[in-house]
Image (cartoon, rainbow, N blue to C red):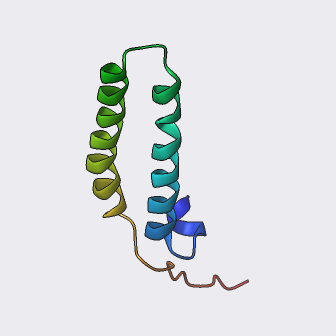
């Protein structure tokens, strides 16, 4: 869906996932746990994002997809 509708699907995906990754750190900061546990939780989120975001974004086109207009 993103690849068809966004003007720059790869850039849009990376920006959205980086923002969501940053938001995923908020509960870790607010968790009622020791600081080392919170840091470990944040690191696991960041490691997962560092692996998943490039892997998925590499499959998206950099620019807009060009589709042929269908005759009416």
Q: What residue is shown at x 29% (from left), y 33% (from top)?
A: 44
Q: Residue at x 62, y 84 (%)?
A: 69
Instruction: Classify the position of the N terminus by image quarter.
Output: bottom right
Residue in the foreground of this view, choosing between 52 and 22: 22
Instruction: Decide if residue 55 is on the left or right side of residue 9.
Output: left
The quarter in which the C terminus is drawn is: bottom right
Kindly identify the residue that appears in the image at 45 percent across and 44 percent down.
21
**Which residue is rendered at x = 36% and y = 61% of the image?**
57
Residue 18 on image: x %, y %:
45, 53
Q: Left or right of 36: which side holds 62?
A: right
Left or right placement of residue 33 versus residue 30 in this view: left
Q: Which of 55 and 33 is in front in this view?
A: 33
Percent position of residue 65, x then y:
49, 78
Residue 1 or residue 7, whichever sits in front: 7
Against 2, residue 26 (above or below) is above
How many marks on residues?
Answer: 0
Residue 23: image x %, image y %?
Answer: 53, 41
């Amino acid at each position: 869906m993103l690849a068809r509708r966004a003007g720059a699907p790869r850039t849009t995906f990376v920006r959205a996932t980086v923002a969501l990754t940053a938001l995923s750190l908020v509960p870790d900061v607010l968790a009622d746990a020791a600081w080392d546990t919170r840091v470990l939780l944040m690191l696991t989120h960041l490691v997962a994002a560092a692996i998943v975001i490039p892997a998925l974004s590499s499959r998206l086109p950099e620019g807009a997809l060009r589709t042929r207009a269908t005759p009416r």
